Amino acid sequence: MAVERFFDERLIGADPALEAALQSSAAAGLPAINVTPAQGRFLHLLARIRGARRILEVGTLGGYSTIWLARALPTGGELISLELNPDYAALARANVGRAGLADRVDIRVGSAASSLAHLGQNDPRPFDLVFIDADKPSTPLYFEWALRLTRPGAVVVIDNVVRDGAVADPATAEAGAQAMRRFADSLAGEKRVSATALQTVGSKGYDGFILALVVA
Ligand code: SAH
Ligand code: DHB
Ligand code: MG
């Protein structure tokens, strides 16, 4: 935690719009399961490195990661974020608006599975980056949609793949870790992506991302 603070103070600094997003989320009783500032900046940098013009996020919560990602977009770029809970989505819209990003963020309420099917039917324009961070047992399904809605060169990031190390425990009782075990199994021999796992520590505990580059 001291290390996290050390780097956050130097590399991230004060950020009123992001801090307001977290404060309003806490005040409204949302769970504090947003990415950390350093992880948010990581997502933001990935989007910029990719030159992303279209970003898809699965799991909005109060819009904290949404703001980090949307700030990477050029004028005319678009981020679509999918959220089941209409109250969370409303708060996220307010937070995104306060961050000055309402013109490029579209938050869609509903189960991500149905919103993704709707996107596949009605708007097959490919995304450059997909961030998957919703209900963990559906991660394999969301990943399949991510592949359908991208082209080679796109980046897919999946959050919460380590779950305090439970992912490596075949006997884990935690549904999220079981889901990530199945997901990792499905990536073995998956020819459409080149993927790695990044373990993270800090204020949100011991967790991690899978980072996948779509190659075919
Ligand atoms: N990406 C956010 C955190 C998301 S937390 C951030 O880092 O700031 C996970 C979110 O997924 C929650 O807001 C939860 O309501 C949402 N969610 C859970 N099940 C869902 C589903 N079936 N479809 C869409 N969203 C879902
Ligand atoms: C949980 C969900 C998340 O997206 C996260 O980053 C941490 C925890 C959860 O559902 O417990
Ligand atoms: Mg997460």
Image (cartoon, grey):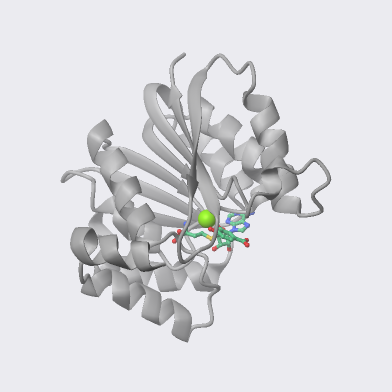
Q: Is 143 left, or right, of 150 in this rendering?
A: right
Q: Nearer the viewer, residue 193 or 70?
A: 193
Rendered position, 96 above or below 104: below
- Residue sitting at x 27%, y 32%: 50
Percent across and percent down for residue 45 are 26, 44
Q: Residue at x 58, y 49 (%)?
A: 112
Q: Nearer the viewer, residue 53 or 205?
A: 205
Q: Position of residue 197 (x, y in %)?
A: 51, 36
| Residue at left offset 65%, top offset 37% | 141
Q: Seen in the image, is 139 located left or right of residue 89? A: right
Q: Where does the image place residue 155, in percent across and percent down from the top left?
A: 40, 31
| Residue 79 vertical placement versus 3 (above, below) | above
Q: Quadrant of residue 125?
A: top left
Observer able to see residue 133: no
Q: Is residue 129 visible?
A: yes
Residue 144 place in picture, x, y as percent: 59, 30
Q: Residue furthest left?
A: 75
Q: Which residue of the protein is positioned furthest toward the front in this rendering?
A: 2
Q: Quadrant of the N terminus?
A: bottom left
Which sits in the foreground, 201 or 29?
201
Quadrant of the rendered image containing residue 100: bottom left
